[in-house]
Image (spheres, rainbow, N blue to C red):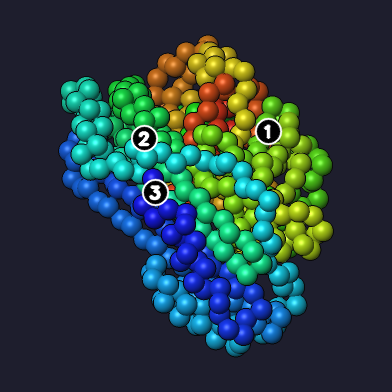
Amino acid sequence: MTAFGSERLLEVAEAALGTGGADDVEALVYRQAGGLTRFAASRIHQSAWREDLWVRVRVVVDGNRVGTATVHAADPAAVRATAGRAAEVARTMPPDPGYPGMPGPATAYPEAGRHDEATAGADPATRAGLVAGVLRRLPAGVAAAGACETRELEIALANTRGVRAAGATTGAGFSILVDAGSGTGWAEGTEPALADLDVATLGERAARKAMDSREPRELAPGTYPVVLEPNAASVMVQWLGWLGFGAKAYDEGRSFLVGRLGQRVCSPLVTIVDDATAADTIGVGFDFEGVPKRRVTLIDEGVAASLVYDFRAATGHGVEPTGHGLPAPSAEGALPMHLSLLPGQTPQADLVAGLERGLLVTRFHYTNLVNLMDTTITGMTRDGTFWVEDGRVVGAVRNLRFTQSILEALSSVRAVGAETEMATEDGYGAARAPALAIDRFAFSSATTF
């Protein structure tokens, strides 16, 4: 049972629909709640709870003048007043000649994500117990920091064209950084349900990496073969999601896929999909315009295959929207938010065993964009960077800065891991990816740590 439930959220949304003098009205209700338990120096130092509900009302007058207003309240009277303010805003707005109208009702919405009662109801004691169990098993002489988080999301949307959509999902995350003096190790997990998070294994993995990372040696910058663990691979997938899979970005010439649709852009081993219907993702079955979400293959065995469309872009192109719309009107256009690089057949351990000389990278940190059109990003390796010879990890190396085109890296993928993990990068959502063996990866400078 969710905290509010679909019927109650839809009642909140429908309170906005009777706005007088409007041609179209849409109300989007978004509720999120969750707990966070943080630890540092191997001690829990914070347990927090946050909860918010907002209603965003979009009103259209005079055929194509669009206004929006938002309120953080579930009270129907407050929602109706917010709709009135949105109408006032609309009357001051210039006409939007490209206004496509609002979507109509769907015949069905797909099952998407997963709502787990235990995760939604997880209390501070539950999260603290998990953290304490991990800390007890750490080796002597190390210190750990990190967080355990549980969250619930409920969304409902109604409009005057007949759309009534509501859904709920949950998520849980655990991250840990272990400091062993001259070396650090890190691990992270994100799953729809807290019970699916193997926090003990994550803690052991971070501790082992920290111990193995001690006394790192210097390594000159250069281009090396690498094995990227799932978190590092996921960061590249998340960046691609922002850099141009949306139809609006493509139409405006600010997508790396401009002129490349139908062409090979990656290794044939690389297939990237956006699939909110996957059981191992986090999300609901409709987008922020109330359109059912579809599974879209964006890169199919290395070939740029498709874009994602919100209602406006789809109307302009004469195609069906794919269910990737953000709250309209949106400057971004459609975005894929359930990205996955599909796994291969090679166990992750065999990727390292197949590396003659090169680097094993645990994670990327603080990545930033250098060049959108060729997908070049820069960032640091952190918390577990190792040199491999003859298929064996022979020691830790100091962290390196990389400056690398994502598409070039994905074009030199030699093998794809069989196991996937979902990972996050601050501000860029989450994506699921396996480990990747890449023949050429450019490291532009060394560090002293």
Q: Position of residue 432 (x, y in %)?
A: 54, 35
Q: CA distance from mark 2 to mark 3?
A: 16 Å
Position of residue 41 relative to residue 307, above or below, is above
Specify the quadrant that holds the N terminus: top left
Question: Tag 2: residue type?
Answer: Leu
List the residue tagged with mark 2. Answer: 194
Question: Tag 3: residue type?
Answer: Thr
- Residue 67 seen anywhere in this rendered image of the structure: yes
Q: Which mark is residue 20?
A: none
- Residue 377 seen anywhere in this rendered image of the structure: no
Which of label 1 and label 2 is nearer to you?
A: 2
Q: Residue at x 48, y 39 (%)?
A: 114
Q: Position of residue 328 (x, y in %)?
A: 61, 66
Q: Is disc 2 in contact with disc 3, using a CB cutoff of under 8 Å?
A: no
Q: Is disc 1 in contact with disc 2, using a CB cutoff of under 8 Å?
A: no
Q: CA distance from mark 3 to mark 1?
A: 35 Å
The front one of 327 and 176 is 327
Q: Quadrant of residue 27?
A: bottom right
Of the two numbered discs 3 and 1 on the same chain, state the one appearing first in sequence.
Answer: 3
Position of residue 149 relative to residue 194, above or below, is below
Q: CA distance from mark 1 to mark 2?
A: 28 Å
Question: Tag 1: residue type?
Answer: Thr
Position of residue 249 relative to residue 177, above or below, is below
Q: Which mark is residue 2?
A: 3
The front one of 214 and 200 is 200
Q: Position of residue 278 (x, y in %)?
A: 57, 36
Q: How many numbered markers are drawn?
A: 3
List the residue tagged with mark 1. Answer: 271
Q: Residue at x 62, y 85 (%)?
A: 21
Q: Residue at x 73, y 35 (%)?
A: 300
